[in-house]
């Protein structure tokens, strides 16, 4: 048995729970043939376990303050956490723009808050390469787009703009932990007040979606909030998560006393 596009596609569903693009499969197949050959199917376990496969098969599109309605909603929630240490998870964070955006908003809030918020953000992705970029905090100018521009002033104290790069101030990294994690597995931490999981759910197969929502729900505190992409909320259903709407923002809240 040799490795084919079909066997890679099945491995992607088994390991990552995702649907795969035919073009991405072809690129990975050519790479495997050049680096390892296609005669040994066990090679697939190696490249999926190492994260090499993720660099071919997962989507890493991201930019600062994407879907600004969510960040407006988040800003309005912040006073509710004034007496606690807020714990946030940015799941499937790609190269980290979402996590930095969350931190910038909290820092902007703290500039005028009577009692500044203590906070920490866990941010993960399955692709080690994009997590490396997130840790470096160096981006192309395309990551500051018109969508979300109403929040760009919050970024100004924390970014240095060069001709072809945007560099995030390392001070933000003190409140963010970036790491590699597979959403098909339980999250390595729990007790989150909020989880951002946006624009990734659509890439998972129908058979893996309940497992993903279970893992996210288990990591939330009672009454914790899950924010998903605008186009994804309607397709997400899980018995421990109540669908809610506030100011045209749809989100989920973990039902109290359910584990």
Image: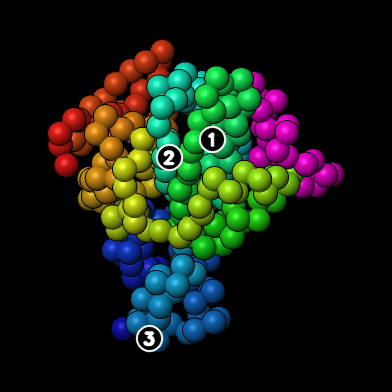
Visible residue check, residue 146: no
> Which quadrant does the N terminus fall into?
bottom left
Contact, CB < 8 Å: mark 1 with mark 2?
Answer: yes
Q: Mark 1, residues whose alpha carbon is within 10 Å: few (<14), some, or many (≥20)?
A: many
Which callout, 3 or 1, points at the residue further toward the start of the chain?
Answer: 3
Which callout, 1 or 2, points at the residue further toward the start of the chain?
Answer: 2
Q: Picture coordinates of residue 196 (x, y %)?
A: 42, 37
Which residue is labeled 3 in the image? 40
Q: Picture coordinates of residue 32 (x, y %)?
A: 49, 77
The correct choice, above or below, for 221 with respect to 94 in the image is above
Task: Name the image quarter holding residue 86.
Answer: top left
> Which quadrant does the C terminus fall into?
top left
Q: Is label 1 in a helix, a strand or a loop?
A: helix
Residue at position x 28%, y 37% in the image: 221
Which residue is labeled 1 in the image? 102
Q: How far apart are marks 3 and 1 (CA)?
A: 44 Å
Instruction: Give, as a single range, the part of the protein colored magenta.
Output: 141-165
Question: Viewer-proximal residue, 205 or 135?
Answer: 135
Visible residue check, residue 193: yes
Q: Is label 3 in a helix, a strand or a loop?
A: loop
Q: Picture coordinates of residue 223 (x, y %)?
A: 26, 29
As drawn, the label of residue 88 is 2
Q: Is residue 176 magenta?
A: no
Tag in front: 2 or 3: 2
Residue located farthest toward the top when viewing the structure as drawn: 247
Q: Mark 3, residues whose alpha carbon is within 10 Å: few (<14), some, or many (≥20)?
A: few
């Amino acid at each position: 048995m040799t490795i084919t596009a079909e066997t890679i596609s099945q491995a992607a569903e088994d390991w990552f729970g995702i649907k795969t693009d035919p073009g991405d499969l072809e690129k990975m197949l050519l790479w495997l043939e050049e680096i390892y050959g296609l005669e040994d199917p066990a090679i697939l376990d190696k490249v999926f376990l190492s994260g090499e496969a993720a660099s071919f098969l997962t989507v890493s599109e991201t930019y600062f303050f994407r879907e600004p309605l969510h960040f407006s909603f988040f800003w309005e929630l912040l006073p509710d956490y004034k007496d606690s240490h807020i714990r946030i998870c940015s799941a499937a964070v790609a190269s980290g723009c979402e996590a930095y955006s969350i931190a910038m908003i909290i820092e902007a809030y703290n500039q005028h808050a009577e009692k500044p918020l203590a906070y920490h953000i866990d941010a993960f992705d399955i692709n080690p390469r994009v997590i490396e970029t997130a840790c470096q905090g160096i981006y192309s100018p395309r990551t500051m787009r018109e969508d979300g521009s109403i929040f760009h002033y919050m970024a100004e104290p924390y970014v240095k703009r060069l001709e072809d790069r945007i560099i995030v101030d390392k001070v933000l990294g003190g409140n963010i932990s970036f790491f590699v994690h597979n959403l098909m597995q339980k999250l390595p931490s729990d007790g989150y007040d909020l989880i951002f999981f946006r624009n990734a759910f659509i890439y998972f197969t129908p058979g893996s979606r309940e497992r993903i929502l279970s893992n996210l729900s288990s990591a939330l505190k009672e009454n914790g909030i899950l924010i998903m992409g605008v186009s994804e909320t309607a397709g997400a259903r899980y018995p421990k998560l109540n669908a809610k709407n506030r100011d045209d923002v749809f989100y989920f809240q973990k039902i109290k006393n359910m584990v």
